[in-house]
Image: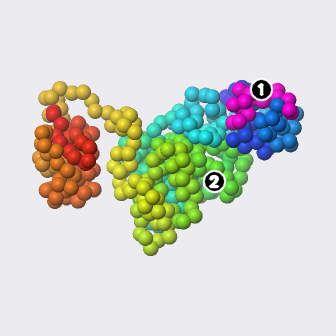
Amino acid sequence: MIADSYLGWVALAVAPGLGARLAARLLRQFGSPEAIFRASLTELEACQVPADVAQAIHLQTPLREAEKELERVRKLNCSLIHWDEPAYPQLLRQIYDPPILLYVRGQPELLNRPALAIVGTRRPTPYGNQMAERLACNLAARGLVIISGLARGVDSSAHRGALLAPGGITIGVLGCGIDVIYPKENRKLFAQLEERGAMVTEFPCGTAPTPDRFPVRNRIIAGMSLGVVVVEAAQYSGSLITARLAMEFNREVYGVPGNVTQPSSFGPNHLIKQGAKLVTGWEDVVEELPTAVRAALFPVEEKTPAERATLFEQSLSETERALYGLLEADRARHIDELVELSGRNSSEVLATLFDLEMKGVVRQLPGKQFVRALL
């Protein structure tokens, strides 16, 4: 049940002409929604509030609309989270214009889990759909929440990929009201996210998915994520807006390289030229995550030497055995040397070394040098 304490927050969200930045400015000035609605016209206009908006707030007109909005929210059985609550996404709170209020359907507790965004064009190639689904599935299987915009194309493939992973979790950020299903063909996907993830928006109930709202939505996708992976995006794609925002928010930006003759490859290829991390598999994404996040997702348990040796022998695959045999405890080998000596391709070698590192039997040194760890 949504408490009446949210009334002031909802009133700010539904107030015509206010917007997230101006609402945030008022909250910082007055301290609470209740104080804003008690302010005089002079005090409101001193905060550069337009005269008609200041007049509406002073007359408390948005509070009456907020009562109706709260009733709609209760009927939908969704949650509200304002930015002073611990449940509010802490990464999102750090951006320069965070929404003051979020509508959430599904599991609100997921909003503070380590997450990565996967975004792209609404008209992907089969390769683009396949890469989005595969990356999302592999990353979700390793404990990362996958965030996207629930749009056609790459977004939908990313959500579906995350749901394919055992225990996979995904969050959809909407450019419309929490009660609006867009596009219509994603009705089943919406239901799956409500059951196994969450859907988030800052827009009031009934808000239509107009084109101007998607760029606004994109800052939430970038703000909630540790990084943004762009799979396919044309030159003027909204996904590039998300990537640019991620850079501004000091998040990681990744690009999946594509065929240079395809218009949809322009976005990720351009980002890679500008310094974005080139991604061909989940390993490329994970290795750029903050150390604390990697440690939480891939904990190395303390074991006795005998236990570690036993575990190592039981879990060793043929490729792992071959690479481990090329390593020594007191002499580092470069990744290129290991590729040449093993006769395997660089992607396979890097992925195998990463797996061995996570098992605690290999250590990576600066400069892509690898040594055995003591068992």
- Single out the mark in the foreground, 2 or 1: 1
Q: Amino acid at mark 1?
A: Ala
| Residue nearest the observer in this picture, 16 or 76 | 16
Instruction: State the residue lying farthest toward the front.
Output: 46
Q: Which mark is residue 35?
A: 1
Q: Amino acid at mark 2?
A: Phe
| Residue nearest the observer in this picture, 368 or 38 | 368
Q: Is residue 273 above or below residue 314?
A: below
Judging from the image, what secondary structure is the residue with disc 2 in? helix
Q: Residue at x 61, y 41 (%)?
A: 96
Q: Earlier in the sequence, mark 2 or mark 1?
A: 1
- Which residue is identified by label 2? 214
Judging from the image, what secondary structure is the residue with disc 1 in? helix
Q: How is the image coloured?
A: rainbow
Magenta stretch, overall SS = helix
Q: Residue at x 25, y 57 (%)?
A: 346
